Each structure stands twice: as structure tokens, then as C-alpha cells.
């Protein structure tokens, strides 16, 4: 049984329920997940080296803008040297990271996080239309995470105009309407000795449980932890 640590919590999303849904989905393919909203303590658990996968499914950042004044005490996170060192050490051990949805907005006081995830959120530029119908299409049909998977439609937030790291090769794109351009929403890449998958989807439990998206997440976890092609193909 592989071990997974899910860091979660934050504004505007039903993270409590959705994290449990994610835990169950990954449990189906052999991951035992621990869930915490305590980012600093959770990252300290990486010191024992027992986690094969680190999943960041959270909306956690310093929240310095005035509009977050009432939420800072509960959800604000400032990354310290110990936090960043632990994430870097996790990657250096060849372990995996699954960054989901709001992970691209989180930890924005640590520029290296954008490099790890492959994208960052630019306040005032990045955006998403209201939660609603979107279309998701595979753009790399031969990658183990997306091989053989069909396009699908469901309700989601389509993140757009994120600050992408140069060279990102999208495995899938998302489009909210014919008036909106399609945006990359999934990629997988080596970062140092580790593997990282970013999935911009995953607003809630319904998103995670959508059959095709669920398979993407399961395969993403397997790929990030260097499971065999046969294991991915069986998912």
C-alpha cells in the first residue's frame, strides 16, 4: 500500500468533503491517504520518508489583501524555510507530487512552488468563469495518464490565463464555452528526481467522482509514484 499525504483546506471550496472523496478514489488504486489542514505540521510528517505521494489540494497563501482580513487567522499560510526544504527533499528522494486545482494559487510567497507545479496564479489576470458546464479534451492521447480516455463534459471551474512555466506540454485542455479559449488543465513532468502532476480540475466531490476525471486522478497518482505502465493501463 502506497502512502499519500493530502494537504487541504481554504476558502470557497468544499475541501473537507472533497478530500475524503479524493482519499476514497486513490484508495481504489492502492493509496492510503492521511488528510490534514495543518500545512506546517503535515509537511513535517514528510521527514520520516514514509510518504510516496504528496497531494496539495488546498487554497492556502498569506492572504495579505484586505478582503481576506476575516479569513487569515483560519486559512492563511506563509511558507517557512522548513516547509520548503521538506518539499524539496521529498522530490530529491524521487517521490511524487499531485497538485490539484487551487494548488496553483497556493504558496505564492514561495516562487519555487510555481516552478514545481508548472503554473502560478496572477491576481488580476488569471481567472475562471462561474462554476458551470465545461468541456475537457485530451491533447496527448499517448501519455499513460490520458491514453485511451475520451473527452467529457461536467460542471467545473475552468482556470484561464495562468502563468505557465515555459515548455509545459498539456495532456488535456478545458473550455467553459465557445466564447472562451481552451486552456491547459493537466500536465505531468519530471522535477529534479521527482515527478509532478498538476490537474487544474477538482472543484468538489462531483468533479473528483466524474468517471473519466476520477481515472485521470488515479493514473496521475500512479504515474507520479512511478507505478508500472501495466498498473496505469489497468486503471
Image (cartoon, helix red, strand yellow):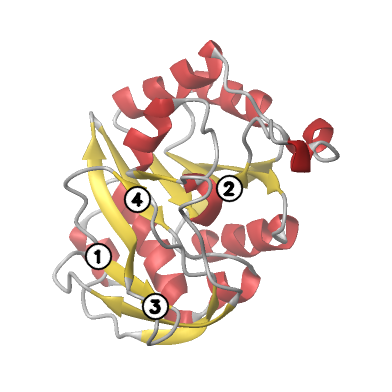
Give the mark toward the camera: 1 or 2: 1
Specify few, some or many for label 1: CA neighbours under 10 Å numbering under 14, 14-19, or 20 or more: many
The residue at which mark 4 appears reads as 197
Specify few, some or many for label 2: CA neighbours under 10 Å numbering under 14, 14-19, or 20 or more: many
Vertical placement of 5 versus 89: above or below? below
Specify few, some or many for label 3: CA neighbours under 10 Å numbering under 14, 14-19, or 20 or more: few
The residue at which mark 3 appears reads as 180
Mark closer to the chain start, 1 or 3: 1
SS at circle 1: loop
Q: Are marks 2 and 4 in contact (CB under 8 Å)?
A: no
Specify few, some or many for label 4: CA neighbours under 10 Å numbering under 14, 14-19, or 20 or more: many
Q: Which quarter of the picture shows residue 90? A: top left
The residue lying furthest to the right in this view is 70
Give the mark toward the camera: 1 or 3: 3
The residue lying furthest to the front in this view is 124
The structure residue drawn at horizontal position 41% and vertical position 27%, both measured from the top left corner, is: 111
Vertical placement of 214 versus 187: above or below? below
The residue at which mark 1 appears reads as 171
Distance in Å between CA atoms under marks 3 and 2: 36 Å
SS at circle 3: loop
67 to the left or right of 219: right
The structure residue drawn at horizontal position 57% and vertical position 16%, both measured from the top left corner, is: 80
Amino acid at each position: 500500500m502506497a502512502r499519500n499525504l493530502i494537504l487541504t483546506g481554504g476558502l470557497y471550496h468544499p475541501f473537507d468533503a472533497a478530500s475524503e472523496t479524493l482519499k476514497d478514489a486513490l484508495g481504489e488504486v492502492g493509496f492510503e491517504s492521511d488528510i490534514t489542514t495543518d500545512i506546517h505540521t503535515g509537511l513535517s510528517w514528510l521527514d520520516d520518508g514514509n510518504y510516496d505521494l504528496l497531494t496539495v489540494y488546498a487554497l492556502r497563501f498569506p492572504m495579505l489583501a484586505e478582503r481576506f482580513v476575516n479569513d487569515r487567522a483560519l486559512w492563511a499560510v506563509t511558507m517557512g524555510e522548513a516547509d520548503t526544504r521538506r518539499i524539496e527533499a521529498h522530490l530529491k528522494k524521487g517521490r511524487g507530487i499531485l497538485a490539484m486545482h487551487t494548488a496553483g494559487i497556493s504558496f505564492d510567497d514561495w516562487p519555487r512552488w510555481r516552478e514545481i507545479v508548472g503554473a502560478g496564479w496572477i491576481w488580476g489576470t488569471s481567472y475562471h468563469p462561474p462554476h458551470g458546464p465545461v468541456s475537457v479534451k485530451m491533447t496527448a492521447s499517448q501519455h499513460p495518464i490520458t491514453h485511451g480516455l475520451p473527452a467529457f463534459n461536467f460542471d467545473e471551474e475552468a482556470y484561464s490565463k495562468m502563468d505557465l512555466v515555459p515548455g509545459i506540454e498539456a495532456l488535456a485542455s478545458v473550455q467553459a464555452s465557445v466564447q472562451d479559449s481552451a486552456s491547459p488543465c493537466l500536465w505531468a513532468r519530471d522535477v529534479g528526481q521527482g515527478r509532478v502532476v498538476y490537474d487544474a480540475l477538482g472543484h468538489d466531490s462531483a468533479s473528483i467522482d466524474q468517471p473519466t476525471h476520477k481515472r485521470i486522478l488515479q493514473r496521475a497518482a500512479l504515474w507520479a509514484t512511478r507505478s508500472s505502465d501495466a498498473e496505469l493501463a489497468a486503471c
